[in-house]
Image (cartoon, rainbow, N blue to C red):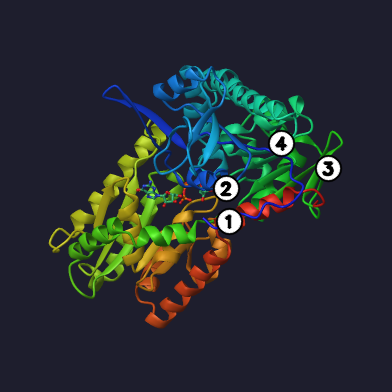
Amino acid sequence: MKRIEMPAGLPGPVVLLSHRAPVAFRRTDGERTARRGAGGLVTALTDLATQLDDVRWVCAAGGSEDVAVAEEHEGTSVPVVLSDEPRVAEGDTGDDPVVPLRLVDVPSEQHDRFYGEIANPILWFIQHGLYGVWSSPDLGDDEHRAFDEGYVPVNLAFADAVADEVEAAGGTALVMLHDYHFYLVADRVRERCPDALISQFIHIPWPGPDAWRVLPPSMRDRLVRGLLGCDVVAFHTEGSARNFLTTVQELLGLRVDLDAMSVEVDGRTVRARAYPISIDVAGLRDLAESPAVARKAEDLEESLAGEDDQLILRVDRTDPSKNIVRGFQAFGLMLEDHPELAGKVRFLALLQPSRQDVPDYAAYLGQIGAEVARINAQYDDLAFEPVDLRLVQDLPLAVAAYSLCDVLIVNAVADGMNLVAKEAAVVNRNDGVLVLSENTGSHQELGEHAVTVYPFDIRQQADALYEALTMPRDERRAKLAAAAAVVERNDIAAWFSAQLADLAPGDG
Ligand code: GDG
């Protein structure tokens, strides 16, 4: 990643909080091993953390070996080398960056309630508009218990770990909290550390106030109040930032200023801001040129039948918010409309099974398989199946497919940003066309260089796929170049720098 500009005057150190850890310890054949944590956010935060002179990182202990490491350090921070070969730092570590990690362990039953019953199903569903409220959710004793005995105490445990780190640094720090798991952290940290500068980045959409009325005031007011402990509450889009402030106004009755995008709370100003997240362009291009990706690309090219054949791609977690089933339905409809394309177009879906402990997610994966089987059965006389569904976790394969595809479809019902669209734009070398949902954050930056889709309209998505597949080469090339330029301008370093600049004294 490019260097991040640190503006003058920020209080040190930086204290980061994310649910996922940048390293996962395991015990294999009696030996302790460690590997880097998965996921784009953790990778980006690792790049940030390793550039900062004074940083501490609070995150969840993910397994028993993480807990063992934390216990060996008596619950205090563990110095960890965050390189390609991560390890607990011992002795002289040379130039390798060492980051103190505070691995927070909470009782597993509490954690399951916090994560598997509130954050992932309920908050995720509300914030992506996934409920059909005539039938769900039903909030009964289990959900109330999950909130009171899971989400609340787990948030307080993480808040106390963050506050301990701030206090250990003398009470002033820049605290950067991440995501929907931790809505109750900021006001607790504020209580204990009134001089800390606190921001929270929310990576998923923030809907308007009415969406939050799915929850009773005892839950929703508490969540919103918790966030008001921040100095800055940050989102991917202006729309989410505005929705946050109108939620504050409608649910809590506070007067907000939509021109200044702020609200006064207990004599403090809380700002709502938008910073569209992006990717490490150079890092991704390096990966795209690696032997591992080249091998995957060769395999893929071999599996594509003829010279003129075209490839539609999607890369997603099997999350209902990604709208995978409607995407297949649209593809099926397009083939019915244009039978001449059957046997010429393949739809490669690289899907990572996600959150299979949540019943709606398990059912969704079943629906995906059924829809693919339905379409493929209609064309069983072709040389290849129209839909090539692969349930895999294989980043080199995904990047190889980004580089080769003719069309990338991202038709999410709602998506905070969607990094897949940005990644494909910078590594595609086939004048690929982006078919992009209007409900993604990335549509705000890339929409004019994409074919827009309306995620509930299957007819329109079928027509959009056809338009993308038949678009003249020149137009394809121009759109892709323009999309790539947008991503290059606003890369991940720019995302961090903009936030840090706004947090520095004098802004506001
Ligand atoms: C949340 C928000 C927001 C893909 N296949 C593999 C793999 N990937 C990587 C992609 C990409 C990431 O996963 C997916 O990122 P998205 O942004 O598309 O989606 P979410 O997971 O839902 O992320 C989203 C994001 O947070 C950041 O703020 O954009 O709106 O929902 O980077 O390359 N990674 C690995 N193996 C794969 O097979 N390891």
- Label 2 SS: loop
Numbered disc in front, either 4 or 2: 2
Q: Which mark is residue 51?
A: 2
| Sequence-first disc among 4 and 2 | 2
Residue at mark 4: 173
Q: Name which residue type carries label 2.
A: Gln
Residue at x 52%, y 20% (from the top left corner):
73
Q: CA distance from mark 2 to mark 1?
A: 7 Å
- Could you tell me residue 469's position as x and y percent? 35, 72
Q: CA distance from mark 3 to mark 2?
A: 39 Å
Check whether the beta carbons of the residues at disc 2 and disc 1 lie within 8 A of each other: yes
Q: CA distance from mark 4 to mark 3?
A: 29 Å
Q: CA distance from mark 4 to mark 2?
A: 17 Å
| Sequence-first disc among 4 and 3 | 4
Q: Residues within 10 Å of mark 3 (few under 14, many from 20)?
A: some
* Mark 3 Cβ inside 8 Å of ligand 1: no
Q: Which mark is residue 175?
A: none
| Sequence-first disc among 2 and 1 | 1
Residue at mark 1: 3
Q: Is residue 183 rendered to the left or right of residue 357?
A: right
- Could you tell me residue 46's position as x and y percent? 51, 44
Q: Please tell me whether residue 50 is drawn above or below residue 277 in the rendered image.
A: above
Q: Residues within 10 Å of mark 4 (few under 14, many from 20)?
A: many
Check whether the beta carbons of the residues at disc 1 and disc 3 lie within 8 A of each other: no
